[in-house]
Amino acid sequence: MTLTVTDLRVARGGIPVLEGLSFTLGAGQALVLRGPNGSGKTTLLRTVAGLQPPLAGQITVPDESLVYAGHADGIKPTLTVEENLRFWAEAFGHRDISSALAAYQLAPLAPRPAGALSAGQKRRLGLARLLVTGRMIWILDEPTVSLDTDAVGMFAAAVRAHLARGGMALIASHIDLGLSEVCTLDVAAYRAKPLEPDDFDGAFL
Amino acid sequence: MIALLTRDIRLAIRAGGGFGLGLSFFLIVVVLVPFGVGPQAEILSTIAPGILWVGALLACLLSLDRIFALDWEDGSLDLLATSPLPMEGLVAVKSLAHWLTTGLPLVLAAPVLGVLLNLPEAGFVWVTLSLALGTPALSVIGTFGAALTVGLKRGGLLLSLLVLPLYVPTLIFGAEVARRGAEGLNVTTPLFLLAGITCGTIALLPFASAAVLKVNLR
């Protein structure tokens, strides 16, 4: 099982941001994307996750293997932590949520409405969602935002366990996760050339 | 998909979910009309089927922007789009959940509120039946409108402008069934046309809604 990206060109709001991007992820590998704000990390991740089409290039992923986690965690404030997690487990065709609760130390919070959680606890719940999906390729956008040091440790442990099971991860992150085995890719090197100004249709769109 | 349906229903009936909002609105509209029209019982009983239909339609409109807007805001829609649920199925389940939490209560409340409008005796069964047949179309068409406006901030008014014209055929034939039924005339033609509209929208619109939702998520 591999995730292959070949000569990819992606656009945000119609403006190309990255081009000529190629990489391959194999089982047990992780790639951390770095780059300044606005360099196209989120756009790249959304494109790989299939939420938007690439302008050019190819993305080859096995069917039904991706799970995406964006800036927002998709948590319903009026459902409890357990109900939130159980919904995502069932949406992905699984039942067991206990190991995910344990991995992020959410078990004591399980009966609490998710709206009553702190920002860091919500993020932990969002990351626990990845574990209940059973998907092999994780696409993570800034997963450590609002996490404290302990929670970053839990996240790093979860990623390490995931890779050890043969999983893959594509992570956009600014901080050092303490994962020695991952590769890093600076997307700033792939910045797209600006559009030609003689784009005739542009005046009518 | 069943998980999504139960989640949506659960969210609707929990605090701030808006269950009962449409129903209360329907009640208020139907109560206000006799105040506006005056106490003439014959006039009220003539316009009762139409008022019940327009009231139900507006009540349905009220909760449309919740179908996708909340899921869009908290990021669930992105996550659902990358989940194993097909987008068409997701849209269909969302419509069904909307109908169960908005349309069905309206159908059940209509005969009770008919009493307030002096609805003729023969009309009760036809008003209820026409609403039961027509409100699913209102939910499905509304889901399409909600999918079109999902990325827009405060798109509620635009949503109403887009959806109301699409509601016209359902309203015409639905109210026609109710009116003819109340007057004791033959209802076959409008009833079949209403059923046809509902079946057609249920069969076709989820595909259109899924397509526009995919475009809006880019």
Image (spheres, rainbow, N blue to C red):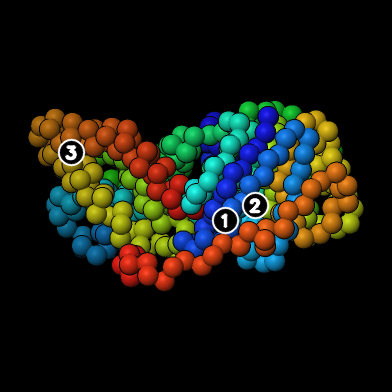
Compared across the picture, whether B174 is left or right of A115 comes to left
Element on which disc 1 rests: strand
The N terminus of chain A is located in which quarter? top right
In front here: A157 or B67? A157
- Mark 2 or mark 3, whichever is nearer to me: 2
Q: What is the chain letter for disc 3?
A: B
Q: Position of residue B167 (x, y in %)?
A: 26, 49
Circle 2: is it few (<14), some (14-19), or many (20+) Cα within 10 Å? Answer: many
Name the residue beneath numbered marker 1: A19
Left or right of residue B156: residue A163: right
Check disc 2 and report the residue beneath it. Answer: A70
Q: Amino acid at mark 1?
A: Glu
Discs 1/3, front: 1
Residue B100 visible from this viewpoint: no
Tell me residue A138's x, y (percent): 70, 41
Above or below residue A51? Residue A65 is: above
Task: Name the subunit of mark 2.
Answer: A
Label 3 SS: helix
Q: Chain of mark 1?
A: A
- State the separation of the CA atoms marked 1 and 2: 22 Å
- Which residue position holds label 3? B177
Determine crowd level at label 3: few under 14, some 14-19, many 20+ residues with C-alpha closer than 10 A: many
Indicate left or right for A106 with A79 as reference. Answer: right
- Location of residue B43 by image quarter: bottom left
- In which quadrant of the rendered view does residue A87 lie? top right
